[in-house]
Amino acid sequence: MGILNVTKDSIIFERRGEIVKISPWGKNVLRFQASPNGVLADEDWIILKQEYCHADVILEENSASITNGTIKAVIYENGKVIYYKKNANTNEFEVLLEEMTEYAFDAMYRTYRANGSQTHQANILFKPYEDEHFYGLGGEHNDCFDMKGCTSDLHHRNTKSSIPFVYSSRGYGFLWNNPSVGRCELTKNHTKWVANCTKQVDYLVIAGDTPEEVMEKYSDITGHTPDFPEFASGFWQCKLRYESQEDLLEVAREYKRRNIPISVIVIDYFHWTEQGDFCFDEKYWPNPEKMVEELADMGIKLMVSIWPTSNPNSKNYAYMNERNMILRTENGLYGMQDFYGQQDYIDMLNPRARDYTWSLVKNNYYNHGIKYFWLDEAEPGMIPNHYDNIRSIKGNFEEVALLYPYCYSKMFYEGLKAEGEQEIISLARAGWAGSQRYGTLLWSGDVPSTFDALRKSVKTGLNMAMSGIPWWTTDIGGFWGGDIESDEFRELIIRWFQFGVFCPVTRLHGSRIKPKNHVDRHPEVKETSGGDNEIWSFGKDVYVILKDLIELREKLRPYVIKYMNIAKETGAPVMRPMFYEYPDDNICYTLDDQYFFGKDILVAPVVEYGVRKRQVYLPEGEWRSIITDKKYNGGGYVTISAALNEVIALEHV
């Protein structure tokens, strides 16, 4: 048994091998910290300090309780914790979340296994509820919407951003405030959170009667987005890859000749001389300032890809390596990935490394007029992911790896802010809790060009929305394997574009298979381009449909900005699961292929090849297609036509 003590606003519990603290973290939120080290680590990671919030703390004979608004926690002398939420109708507290133990007797809540020094593997278990649904955990191409029944490894990789937050249909949010590589099990027999290498257990429980209430408080804790740049609400053109300045400009000019609105065009990787040089190859990009100016005259912003990598051949490698600015291995030779030579990653957790890297970006890109950056390889993309063999300035990578993309985005945001920039948006392949406050636009990574990937992308976007990331997008058409001459891919690019129009950002990208008549423009470059990926590249019939879709997105831009402003203020995602608007409708918790775009538009993408109609669930009331004006009665499923050029998007009348 342990010893319970209370302060004016917290509970302290101690027993052999553990110290625990439960305290308020803003209204209706409780923070739990526990360590086997005899002292709690003074580290908040990314959570923001909240205004002081008084809590009612009571010490009883065998337990202590803390009540903060609608949430209450009771900890017993055996260490067990139970959370309660006040029922808005009865005003009584009901069980919300209850710890359980793996042992046959009622003890050993929270278990630890020493790694060495002050770090441990830490495990915590909660009782399962059969009717509970979970959403969030970031973005992963796993074909899951409701995460109940799933196990998810907590690490980043291409197509996977682990954000250790879940929203529960029982009316709470749970943030695992720990950047350690680990695991989350939302299975039938338990809910389990594991940190492989940590000094303490640290999590927050957020009580709320609606998803809207929980997500707003979660944003208060992890940070709200900055202003969404108005230009970013338009169409983005991208491909793997434009090999030269003239190639890129000619595409931009063609869009203007065709009178097709385009807001952003993107330069992908290997426009540089060597990884780690952070500069254009002058042979192919001779005058960046002139390029930026010509694009600006056409009303187009330029975004440029940056990798957080350095190769020993880089002119900056030795300087960074000698000053511990590069992630290094605990054992054996450096080299975290082999890609045109040894590829090492800059230690983005090191403030000095961030400052130096930004100085290179500033001198070689920003000073040429480039203000928008694509943060690729943001996980970082190590092969294999042996985190325990990597050393960062913050410690062994097993303990801190999830912080990497967060710090990567932070570098660009703070660098641009220091230059006086106000419109900041960075496209990134990975993020963590709090990435949103640095103007991070996450995308789903290098997914294949298949209808299967499109179907999964809808679910990925909805779970990313419920992870506190309002700015999200995909590669329209998928990234790899797209044959631009095949009928199936041409149908796929239409269906994916229809989905992309109703995503927070509409961005065409991909590495297309080169057709037989493809001519490499610069066959001598290190990484040649894929097949063409402009909207006129897929045949005349497809072109007409895609052009109309871009014009539809143009009409939607004021609507997108309206809801981006709401996202900034309240944390409400632009792309919302159906239950977000209808939390009392149980069917809405099961709908993984339709969603709300903002509060007013219900979207039902077609995600299967050859489909020309589909069933859509409409809540009670009358609904009208914003495309055809046709009306439908809600309160159940209806069948709606979905010809190849038809978008299913409805509003409540």
Image (cartoon, rainbow, N blue to C red):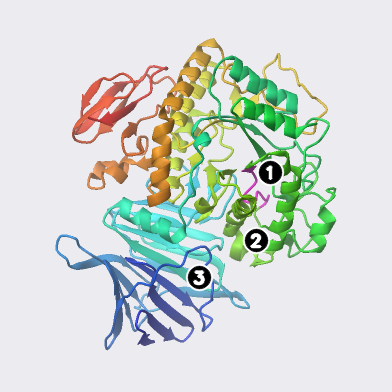
Distance between the Cα atoms at labels 2 and 3?
A: 23 Å
The kind of residue tagged 1 is: Ile
Q: Compared to 221, does 364 lie above or below?
A: above
* Span shown in magenta: 374-384
User: Which is more toward the observer, 629 or 310?
Assistant: 629
Which element carries disc 1, helix, strand or loop? strand
Assign the magenta stretch its main secondary structure. Answer: loop
> In the rendered image, which quarter is residue 423 located in?
top right
Query: Do labels 2 and 3 touch, CB within 8 Å?
Result: no
How far is mark 1 from mark 3, CA to CA? 36 Å
> Pointer 1: what residue?
306
Q: Which marked residue is nearer to the observer: mark 1 or mark 3? A: 1
Task: Work out which quarter of the rendered image holds the C terminus and state it.
Answer: top left
Q: Nearer the viewer, residue 603 or 637?
A: 603
Q: Amino acid at mark 3?
A: Ala
Q: Position of residue 198 (x, y in %)?
A: 55, 70
**Pointer 3: what residue?**
122
Can residue 239 be seen here?
no
